Amino acid sequence: MAVEIRELEAFLVLADELHFGRTAERLYVSQSRVSQLLRALERRIGGPLFERTSRRVTLTPLGKEFLTSLRPAYTALERAIDEARDYAGNAKGKLRVGFQGSASDQILDAVSAFQARNPNCVIGVCELPLNDPFGTLRRREIDAAIVLLPIAEDDLIVGPVFSQEPQTFTVSSRHALAGRSSIDAEDLAGQTLISIAPPAPGYWRQAQAPTQTPRGALIRRGPEVHTFSEGLSLIAADQGGMLVCRATASRNHRPDIVSIPLTGYPDSAFALVWRRGEETPSIRAFAKHLEQR
């Protein structure tokens, strides 16, 4: 019959205390429960472990021998449990994170700071296709992804939201609106927005390249792209414009492209996402790290 851990705990504590009352207090049980555990252990072993009188409790020769053998084994078991608990609660191993477009300074700084604070976890980053924000994550090629909102995927958990930035309308320097200091969302009526190709979900593609203004005026749909670099090339070739957050527009400044501040649309924002039911200590630690920045 398999020995229960609680029986071994009762034996070890009673061997230290040699008193049923103090043993019960340390184990947070009744004295009768201590006696029950000891009797069960003695039945499994096949002999008495303690001599019990009305005045004292002492170890039998069998009890002394068992104590000598058990204590180091029990200590090793406790150490194994502590090590497992420590591993479960800390970031270790490797964390693979994907991001869309060129990584912002905020993302790179977060990665660098996380690595410094968690030297036992090697963090690797890779660029995700603009038109497939979730595929690499679902194929388990990465552990988590930093993706533009909105995100409405049932199999994914949406973690901290960060890097909220105003939108711009990024167009060729020859575009009719290029000289404006700012525009409103309704000014996009009749304009052409470069689209994002599948397999990105329809709701996500619509958010990045809407086909209507907030008041319902039509926006023309331009050619589809797979990467942000393709989009910039098409913008420079006068094939349409794109909604680009202010920080990304600043990082990708070109003389043949301008980014006009845009009002009337929600700010751009990123979120960390990972597969539902597969949160690891490293993901949890990185998510908490992003929340604190």
Image (cartoon, helix red, strand yellow):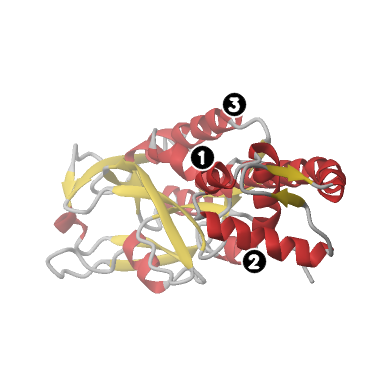
Residue type, numbered disc 2: Arg
Find residue 18 and report its image quarter: top right
Locate residue 128, reporting x and y percent.
57, 54
Query: What residue is at 79 percent from the left and 57 percent from the top?
Result: 48
Q: Which residue is mark 3?
A: 116
Query: What residue is at 74 percent from the left and 49 percent from the top?
Result: 51
Locate residue 165, reporting x and y percent.
30, 41
Per the model, the C-alpha gap separating discs 2 and 3 is 28 Å
**Foreground pick, 106 / 121:** 121
Q: Quadrant of the C terminus?
A: top left
Query: What residue is at 31 percent from the left and 43 percent from the top?
Result: 164
Q: Does the rendering let one see residue 254?
A: no
Query: What residue is at 67 percent from the left and 49 percent from the top?
Result: 53
The reply to whether the C-beta atoms of the residues labelled 1 and 3 are less than 8 Å apart is no
Question: First in sequence: mark 1 or mark 3?
Answer: 1
Question: First in sequence: mark 2 or mark 3?
Answer: 3
Q: Badge 2: how crowded within 10 Å, few (<14), some, or many (20+)?
A: few
Per the model, the C-alpha gap separating discs 2 and 1 is 22 Å
- Say how many tags the image has: 3
The reply to whether the C-beta atoms of the residues labelled 2 and 3 are less than 8 Å apart is no
Q: Which residue is mark 2?
A: 139
Residue type, numbered disc 3: Ala
Q: Which residue is mark 1?
A: 103
Locate residue 104, reporting x and y percent.
47, 36
Residue type, numbered disc 1: Ala
**Secondary structure of the residue carrying numbered label 1:** loop
- Judge whether 289 appears above or below 262 on screen: above
Find residue 255 and report its image quarter: top left
Q: Mark 2 or 3, which is nearer the eye?
A: 3
**Foreground pick, 260 / 22:** 22
Q: Mark 2 or 1, which is nearer the eye?
A: 2
